[in-house]
Amino acid sequence: MELRALSLEQTKEIYRPCLARDFPPDELMPWEWMERLIQEGKQASVGFYDENGMAAYAVFILEGEDSPAALINYFAVQPERRGQGVGSQCLELLRQALNGKDVSLLFEVESPECARDQAELAVRRRRVNFYHRCGAVMTRVDSVLFGVDYHIMLLPPAEGGAQPGKSDEELAAALERLYHVVVYQGPEADFTFEQVCGVTLREPPAPQAKQEAGKFSRELGRALTFLFRNRKKFMGEKLREYEFTGAMYMILLHVHRHPGASQDSIANHMYLEKCTVTRRTKKLEELGCLYRETDPSDRRQNKLYLTEKGESLAPVIWGYLTQWGEEATAGLTAAEKDTLLRLLTKMTGQDKR
């Protein structure tokens, strides 16, 4: 079995004979809308092929280039290939494709708790058990989309298990952003996003004392996640004109402070995946912001340095970061800012270094 990316034209070729056959009309995107999402880089399709042709296909929703998460929007095995283990083979191929990728692959399963009768309950439980056998992980994220209740599962890479650092709170936030892509909100829509879509987190049952402790952790995580997302959005908007995305500005500032840093040292210092650092440094090179030189003491390593353009951008980025920090803490007194910074530093353990 082989996984192949499908082009816009190839996706169009399977829309009528496959997607329109396998999914109810009220669950199927109009082709015009799907085409627009593909052109915007917010939808991608793959086919699973063997010697007999295409055995299955999957369609994903993305936020755009370098999307941190993807949602399996449609997945189906060809009718004549069902019951032959094709589905599990396809999921394994997807897991292999995720190796080394910093992306969370999410999909929905209809909630067993919301089944209308015992027969439907049995079907939904079998489906969840099947995905578990294929290596999928159940998250605490739930959603409601157009009146259907879902549990959200995560398909981890084939090597190394689920990606570290992806909390359920982060997955819930990513899913909500993906739903904003899925749910049509054009002028013809007769509903708002909030009326048809909702994302929540299930709370594990616990004694009262543990519930209170859990509440603190949840609220702390929510606050930190909000601040992280807020800064990411702020910096993304400010640096869009420079074609910066993701961690590019942080890598540039690190090299500014540590000329000659290696990609490995950047990954370790900033807690980033090495593949992420590789992609971002390559993009910074293409933009003319940094260059690399071979380390004479270890020719397998490269030392990174800023170009004149990169040096000129460093104070601009610091200025935007300062602006964000001032706006985020505008409601705090000077003493409260000092206390906040001291406590956060203590939490990270940096005060002991």
Image (cartoon, rainbow, N blue to C red):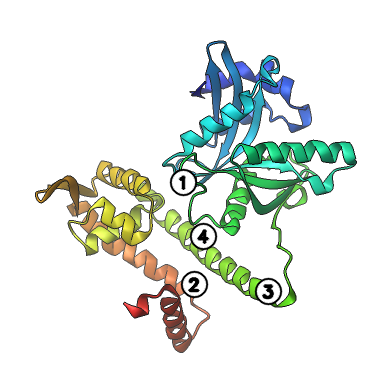
Residue identified by numbered label 4: 229
Q: Give residue 261's position: percent from left, percent from top.
A: 21, 56
Determine crowd level at label 3: few under 14, some 14-19, many 20+ residues with C-alpha closer than 10 A. Answer: few
* Secondary element at image label 2: helix
Residue 328 badge: 2
Discs 2/1, front: 1
* Secondary element at image label 4: helix
Q: Residue at x 51, y 62 (%)?
A: 230
Counting residues from the N terminus, which is met first, the one under dot 3 or under dot 1? 1
Could you say which is closer to the camera, residue 62 or residue 263? 263
Q: Please, what is the three-letter code of the amino acid marked with disc 3? A: Lys
The quadrant where residue 126 appears = top right
Residue 160 badge: 1
Q: Please, what is the three-letter code of the amino acid marked with disc 4? A: Arg
The quadrant where residue 350 appears = bottom left
Image quadrant in which the C terminus is located: bottom left
Q: Are marks 4 and 2 in contact (CB under 8 Å)?
A: no
Q: Give residue 122's position: percent from left, percent from top.
A: 82, 38
Determine crowd level at label 1: few under 14, some 14-19, many 20+ residues with C-alpha closer than 10 A. Answer: few
Q: Are marks 3 and 2 in contact (CB under 8 Å)?
A: no
Q: Is residue 333 above or below residue 125?
A: below
- Cα distance between the residues tagged 3 and 1: 30 Å
- Cα distance between the residues tagged 3 and 2: 31 Å
- Cα distance between the residues tagged 4 and 2: 12 Å
* Secondary element at image label 3: helix
Counting residues from the N terminus, which is met first, the one under dot 2 or under dot 1? 1
- Cα distance between the residues tagged 4 and 3: 28 Å
Discs 1/4, front: 1
Residue 210 badge: 3
Counting residues from the N terminus, which is met first, the one under dot 4 or under dot 3? 3
Q: Is residue 150 left or right of residue 107?
A: right
